[in-house]
Image (spheres, rainbow, N blue to C red):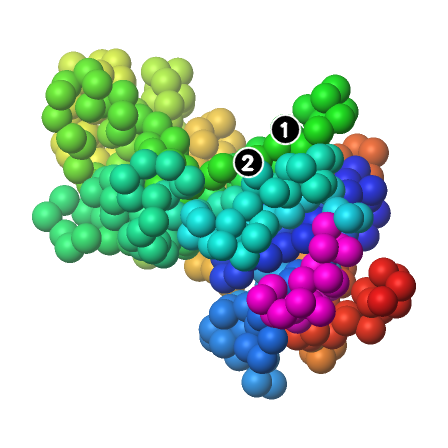
Amino acid sequence: MAGPLHDITVIDLSRVLAGPYATMVLADLGARVIKVERPGGGDDARAYGPFINGQSAYFASINRGKQSIALDLKAPDDRAIFEALLDRADVLLDNYRPGVMARLGYGWDVLSQRYPRLIHAASSGFGQTGPDSQKAAYDMVVQAMGGIMSVTGHPGGPPTRVGTSVGDITAGLFTVIGVLAALHDRKATGRGQFVDVAMLDGQIAILENAIARYAATGESPGPLGARHPSITPFAAYQCADAPIVIAAGNDQLFAALCKALGLPQDDPRFAGNEARTANAEALAQVLESVLATRPAAHWLPKLEAAGVPCGPLNTIGQALANPQVKARNMVVQTALPDGTPLIAAGNPIKLSGHADPATRAPAPALDGDRAAILKELGL
């Protein structure tokens, strides 16, 4: 696929999600990604559902547009192939626990000497340093340890995981940022470098308002359901048939909201954002007393016409069918390894100098590109 990274080759040793998500983004930006998988089973995600024709749609959605070769990095012949790939690579990416690459003979001290222009990015649960660096981690572990789960859900409710794997995905995105920064730096220095990204670090990095609230009060914030902790009204509110989200982030928008709903604007409980936040439950009752009289389809266009940020609570199917989503090419066509069509999320990075095609190459079959890669390497 053409793109700004068309001259970059990535060797991808990662599996499941954090690393493969990072290399998917790099592939969408035009990089060539060669996925090195273990012989026999390949990436663990090949065995994760949902399945179509016996193939993992989960794997295919994250590994589209890549190539695959199966190598045993403990076998001399396969190590020779791997090292031939490194000779031509710009980036090596793995998500092993710290120390695994060194035990294989491919620690950064070795790689940096043999391949001075190579960038080695490692995305792990806890990073290369610290007392927990050797612990295993999955997405839910770092969501819990990083505090995200403590502010997710409803007050008094059970522990609630964020609905997507934000631990893995955040780490994958930060890994991409690190790789791009290292590629830029290499232009000046001529040398690659080691990029160390931890899933737990990523969760801390996106705590945002929660850290500010803790710093200001000394108390750990808890879950608030759909409500914003410091901006009101900024939540989901019930109409006659369904909830809608209203996000009136300043006094002008609140005034526009009140006018659209036919509410008075002189209630002292709601005079300013601080007062509205302190009286958020009372305000919700006032708003819903009006909203509940008509369906969401009545209120949404009325609020939009008034300039009030709002939206429906879409299901996944509704979100994918949204004309705005389609207009932005955020649902693309790809395929399973056998060619069976599959839809997937598009690339949210739109570049004026490069096309954003509506299709993506299929995910690779395990070891499906071995012959072509060996021929290219002259092996």
Q: Are marks 2 and 1 in contact (CB under 8 Å)?
A: yes
Mark 2 vs 1, N-terminal side: 1
Residue 297 horizontal/vertical position (percent): 44, 50
Q: Write down the quadrant of residue 177 in the picture.
A: top right
Residue 195, numbered label? 2
Q: Compute the Cα span from label 2 to label 1.
A: 9 Å
Residue at (57% x, 38% y) in the render: 109
Q: Is residue 250 above or below residue 209?
A: above
Residue 181, numbered label? 1
Residue 46 horizontal/vertical position (percent): 54, 73
Query: Identity of the amino acid at label 1?
Result: Ala
Per the image, is 82 magenta? yes
Q: Is residue 276 visible?
A: no
Front in this rendered view, residue 45 or 293: 45
SS at mark 1 in the image: helix
Residue at (37% x, 36% y) in the render: 129
Q: Is residue 248 left or right of residue 145?
A: right
Quarter occupied by the C terminus: bottom right
Q: Is residue 219 left or right of residue 363?
A: left
Q: Is residue 146 visible?
A: yes
SS at mark 2 in the image: strand
Residue 342, numbered label? none
Q: Local crowd at mark 1 within 10 Å, few (<14), some, or many (≥20)?
A: few
Q: Is residue 110 above or below residue 230?
A: below
Residue at (51% x, 49% y) in the render: 102
Per the image, is 321 magenta? no
Query: Identity of the amino acid at label 2?
Result: Val
Q: Write down the quadrant of residue 43 in the picture.
A: bottom right
- Which portion, as a residue range, is magenta? 67-86
